[in-house]
Amino acid sequence: MKLTALSLAFGLLASASAAPTTSDEATIAATPTASADATAKPKPISSSTPAFNAVKGTGSWSAAVKEAKTLVSKLTLLEKTILATGVGWESGPCVGNILNIPSIKFPGLCLQDSPLGVRFGDRTSSFPAGINVAATFDKDLMYKQGVAMGEEFRAKGINVALGPMMNLMRAPAAGRAWEGGSGDPYLTSITAAATVKGIQSQGVIATAKHYILNEQETFRKTGSSNVDDRTFHEVYLPPFKACVDAGVGAVMCAYNFINGTQACADEYVINDVLKGELGFQGFVMTDWWANYEGIQTALAGTDMLMPGDAIFPNITTPGVPPFSFPGAGTFWYTNLEKLVNNGTIPAALVDDKATRILAAWLQLKQNKNFPAVNFDSWTPKNNKHVDAQADHDKLIRQVGAASTIVLRNTKSVLPISTKKGHYTLSLHGSDAGPGIHSPDFFPDKGGYDGTLAQGWGSGTAPFPYLVSPYEGISARARADHIRVTWDFDDYDLAGSQTLADASDMALVFVSANSGEEYITVDGNVGDRNNLTLWKNGDNLIQSVASKNRNTVVIVHAAGAVDMPWINNPNITAVIYALMPGQESGNALADVLFGAVNPSGRLPFTINADRTQYAADIEYKSSEPMPQVNYTEALLIDYRWNDAKNIEPVFAFGHGLSYTQFSYSNVKATASSSGKTATMSVDVSNSGKVAGAEVVQLYLGFPAAAGEPPKILRRFEKVNIKAGQRRTVKFTLNEEDFSIWQGGWKVVRGTFTAYVGASSRDIRGKSTFKI
Ligand SMILES: *[C@@H]1O[C@H](CO)[C@@H](O)[C@H](O)[C@H]1NC(C)=O
Ligand SMILES: *[C@@H]1O[C@H](CO)[C@@H](O)[C@H](O)[C@H]1NC(C)=O
Ligand SMILES: *[C@@H]1O[C@H](CO)[C@@H](O)[C@H](O)[C@H]1NC(C)=O
Ligand SMILES: *[C@@H]1O[C@H](CO)[C@@H](O)[C@H](O)[C@H]1NC(C)=O
Ligand SMILES: *[C@@H]1O[C@H](CO)[C@@H](O)[C@H](O)[C@H]1NC(C)=O
Ligand SMILES: *[C@@H]1O[C@H](CO)[C@@H](O)[C@H](O)[C@H]1NC(C)=O
């Protein structure tokens, strides 16, 4: 009877159920194979019922959890395992699919990438990447982009959006760092939490990923990230905690191992920390196939296998299932049922998994008026082409401009103006143009020959269109009767020089790309092999700059790049635009021509060369389980520069405006209780145009605490009119004064509040006692 209901509801699943091989031999967990050996040291499984952190149903989750428990009480064990097991890769319209359960009117779940828009969507937008969202340092825009993305996911009937991404940019070459993160835990926490709130405001479940210590692509499925407990709690956990506090419905556990235990099978990080310490009440899904076995993954607290099937080892669904289940074979579903029946997994643990999944669905009110899935990732003819774009192009342009970072602007050469003698602009490099192929010509963006506006991998979305810098700039220049010439050939140095020689300003467009490990681009297996520019960028810059005293360099990149040309005085402006999405050229033109006063800030440090960074990618290892040791510990990004006295080329938090800001009256005072401190500073716009300053508060601990010299604890982007002054106030609390010592401990002593415009541009400081 259920057969009909299920296969009708998911019509296209039925055809994919083709050949579930029936094999009595098939087993689930821990089948030893060559690669399974890499999963070394599985924790011993206790035969007694292991304790686990069941969902508490407290706070804002109480009603949803209560209702979920009622629903779960009506389910058979097998139905609970259906909730916990995806149907298999490409066996449903979304990248992840949970079957429907008619008896409780549960319509199933659609899970879809990515952190910057609907992957495989059409009539959807390509938003600025997470690294750009961080670079805005603008909490309001972070939230608004989340809202707009949430609207698009909802319009397509997607229950669970697979973002935001919050792994930190520990190493500048890290392949996926552009999808989210930044070099700082606090900035990443604020960015991720605002994004979660925005997405979930539209009733779409957001996913905090990838939990945890997934900071490089090389060896991502075999390598072990090793970090001490203090660094784990103080640096890598805060973004996830911020998302839990923001009410995130889902968390995705990562591919990598942690201290030798696979992340999704790590009882300490999932059950103890996430569900215990942080009190997470939603559900944990695996990254795609990050279920290397079935038992410990279940016991550790992972609630849902995605996409459900087991690609490794090669297992088929055992026995004859009571109804056709499309997965090619899975560690859970009927196998989970067996494990419960023979006492390996407690029944209550499976109840808890089902409860958490339904609770998230109810918490976001998806049981009421949630649109049905109306697109298909694999079969375009099943697509109903629902228009989800709305007027999001405006916000995308705004976030693009707000994340465009002006690193240098000698003698105010920018904004471009005929009053400054800018009558002819020459554009150089393939990154200025639309390319020979559209960006989506390359599957999952695994290649590019025009402007770079998105990295590669699953964290991508189709471009409905892409405004190239050439289009954005030429449209604007046309209006001002400024002439535009171009040479998009990266290797035509002579031609570029001729053009540069004849122009009033030469704009050189360069790029450096990175992405996810399953695609290799120009020999880069996700992580970048080097920090130099791609496509002859350094040579093009030097050669243009040798002919033009007004050379402006525009960088589209996944992270920091080496700038061997930075001391050339002919390079009067440098702009970092990162990965700005579909409105790239318009957003850039807004800043270049001064329609928008720039206010983007660098969300990571740029050093002179790769040896000066806190950490690098572990590229080479002959170990079956390569070790990625986080030996820099707390000293990520600018904290390393501070501790080691390394002068950066451009500091974390740096970015210029077309106006100037001055700081005065920096004053920090502890409250009489000694538990909080207030910091206040006056910021004046001493220039001639309105602008936005990002006021940054870094905290210095008493030396005995063993903390880095200073840590970003607060920031605020404030709009200030020319000639006006604003007072900015921050309040710090006990959490801000705490360090991890097997538990959070408030440090007592004299603290220093540093206030400034970047980690290296401190404009005032004040001490106070806690
Ligand atoms: C990893 O091992 C280190 C060193 O023994 C320990 O401090 C830390 O707590 C462990 N971390 C995790 C997440 O297991
Ligand atoms: C998995 O099974 C399929 C079908 O039996 C077979 O073609 C394939 O070679 C197997 N893959 C591995 C890695 O053993
Ligand atoms: C329970 O069943 C699983 C899967 O069939 C098997 O691997 C495991 O050894 C069984 N355990 C016990 C205690 O029978
Ligand atoms: C760095 O990598 C890029 C992209 O693969 C390549 O174009 C460039 O030549 C490399 N640079 C060096 C110095 O090897
Ligand atoms: C700067 O440009 C001028 C004019 O083309 C040129 O003579 C000079 O050599 C350039 N300087 C550098 C350092 O490239
Ligand atoms: C990582 O740390 C372990 C334990 O200290 C050490 O044995 C190993 O050699 C280190 N590996 C690398 C690649 O640094």
Image (cartoon, rainbow, N blue to C red):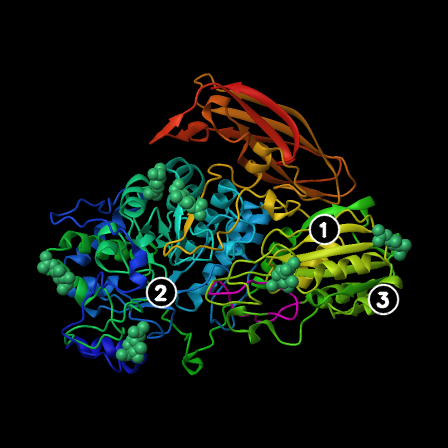
Q: Where does label 3 land, which residue?
A: 499
**Magenta residues, start to end:** 448-467
636 vs 226, left or right, is right
* Cα–Cα span, label 3 and label 1: 23 Å
Q: Give coordinates of residue 456: x percent, y percent.
A: 53, 65
Element marked by disc 1: loop
- Kindly indicate the quadrant of the structure image that contains residue 111: bottom left
Whether residue 75 is visible? no
Pick the quarter of the image with the N terminus. bottom left
* Ligand 6 rendered quadrant: top left
Nearer to us in this view, 617 or 281: 617
Residue type marked 1? Pro
Left or right relative to 407: residue 86: left
Graded by Cα atoms within 10 Å as few (under 14), some (14 to 19) or many (20 or more), the crowding at tag 3 reads many
Q: Seen in the image, is 578 located left or right of residue 743?
A: right
User: CB of mark 3 within 8 Å of CB of mark 1?
Assistant: no
Between the residue at mark 1 and the residue at mark 2, the CA separation in whole angstroms equals 53 Å
**Residue that badge 1 annotates:** 564
As helix, strand or loop, the secondary structure at mark 2 comes to: loop
Mark with earlier residue (3, 1) = 3
Q: Give the SS element for disc 3.
A: helix
Q: Nearer the viewer, mark 1 or mark 2?
A: 1
Residue located beneath label 2 in the image = 370
Question: Does the magenta segment cover residue 259?
Answer: no
Q: Identify the mark at residue 137; answer none if there is no mark.
A: none
Q: Measuring 58% from the left and 67% from the top, which residue is drawn there?
A: 522
Judge whether 304 appears above or below 270 on screen: below
Q: Which of the two labelled residues, at mark 3 and mark 2, occupies the earlier sequence position?
A: 2
Q: What residue type is labelled 2?
A: Phe
Crowding around mark 2 (Cα neighbors within 10 Å: few <14, some 14 to 19, many 20+) is some
Q: Decide which of 741, 483 is in the foreground and name it.
A: 741
User: Neighbour class for label 1 at 10 Å: few (<14), some, many (≥20)?
Assistant: few
